[in-house]
Amino acid sequence: MTTYRRVVLANRPKGKATLENFRLEDTPVPDLGDGQFLVRTIWLSLDPYMRGRMDDGPSYADPVKVDETMTAGAVGEVIASRNARFAVGTIVVGAFGWADHAISDGEGVLAITGDEVPISTALGVLGMPGHTAWIGLNTILEAQPGETIVVSAATGAVGSLVGQLARLKGLRTIGVAGGADKCAHAVDTLGFDACVDHRSGDAKDLRAAIAAEAPDGVDCYFENVGGKTQAAVLPLMNTFGRIAVCGLIAWYSGQNLDQGLITPAVMRKILVSRLRVRGYIIFDHWDTYGAFRKEVAPLVAKGDVTYKEDVTDGLENAPQAFLNLLEGGNFGKQLVRVGADPT
Ligand SMILES: NC(=O)c1ccc[n+]([C@@H]2O[C@H](COP(=O)([O-])OP(=O)(O)OC[C@H]3O[C@@H](n4cnc5c(N)ncnc54)[C@H](OP(=O)(O)O)[C@@H]3O)[C@@H](O)[C@H]2O)c1
């Protein structure tokens, strides 16, 4: 093998990202240096944060450079190795990028097995999104039994686990999701007490629908989207309520900026209801990954926690799948199957 395929950032989007922002290309496979190994990608993870990496500007992480491989977590198989810790045949998860092969020195790479759960879960329910859900619910919101929680993007990679863990903890769980199918899944499969469709009606309608499901008000809001959902939920917050600002996907492409802006009325609500609003980035919590996995992996293995994956085939289809994700076209954790799964 002399070349591999990768997707690079061709140019930076202006507003909404488009297919023209990406380029699929062949690139030479470099010789392995001491301590390096070659990974064949099996599963590629697509995540909303990647939209932020396409822009040049201050953030919590550096942007992807133009003509560089798009960043991504992926699961793959070691197929050549000069690293004693990662022998040929080992299944690994790491930041391998949008590519069908990657060279690694092992930094930030974990060896995994498919013994108890499929290896793809290392990118979803038992990976970065799952960890984000667990930290957000327990550490950021400090959610308590008997409280009411609203979760936006409720059927997604993060939201679906927030809802299930909150239910297991004894909270009343209200999901917000796009469309009747996603709402039915939230209630029937994920076990939310109720789910409200944000695609029908404006923020006022949404607020009324959530209020009807939250007779005691809202103690915790797990914020994944911003936009009109945020505008709908905020006035329903109880005194001493908590908001975990996990994501703001409705605003990632510079759209909907007239919805849910911080206004004097919002700030007044934060003041008079003594709300705690805390943003967080999962990178600051890697030290708890082991504890998260220890608690949640058995729940997944036993089926107490369920998960849904939305699989697109072929690296060449990753850009379109990513654009769909940003518009809510995914139903469950968005993955790309890049190569055969041997487990
Ligand atoms: N802070 C962190 O460290 C961290 C880590 C991971 C993820 N996140 C954030 O968590 C959020 C969820 O990520 P995920 O990986 O679980 O993605 P996901 O929920 O699987 O997929 C994104 C979902 O966002 C919803 N959405 C898209 N545009 C929307 C809009 N304009 N208004 C309302 N909802 C919209 C769609 O669901 P519906 O069709 O149901 O609306 C879409 O399916 C994202 O904001 C992401 O950036 C943060």
Image (tube, rainbow, N blue to C red):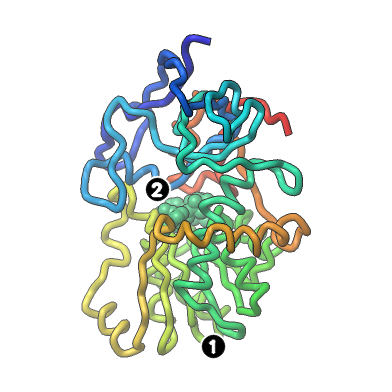
At 36% from the left edge and 43% from the top edge, which residue is drawn?
51
Q: Is residue 19 left or right of residue 290?
A: left
Amino acid at dot 1: Asp
User: CA–CA distance between discs 2 and 1?
Assistant: 34 Å
Quarter of the rendering containing residue 140: bottom left
* Residue bearing the label numbered 2: 49
Q: Is residue 315 left or right of residue 49?
A: right
Q: Secondary structure at mark 1?
A: loop
Name the foreground residue: 67 vs 204.
67
Mark 2 burial class by Cα count in 10 Å: few <14, some 14-19, many 20+: some
Q: Residue 137 location, x and y as percent?
A: 52, 70
Looking at the picture, does residue 92 appear above or below residue 175? above
Label 2 beta carbon less than 8 Å to ligand 1: yes
Q: Is residue 33 left or right of residue 9?
A: right
At 65% from the left edge and 49% from the top edge, which residue is drawn?
308
Residue 227 visible in this rendered orientation of the protein: yes
Does the CB distance between marks 2 and 1 fall below 8 Å?
Answer: no
* Residue bearing the label numbered 1: 216
At 50% from the left edge and 66% from the top edge, which residue is drawn?
135
Amino acid at dot 2: Tyr
Name the foreground residue: 198 vs 10.
10
At 48% from the left edge and 17% from the top edge, which residue is drawn?
4
Name the foreground residue: 191 vs 3.
3
Residue 315 visible in this rendered orientation of the protein: no
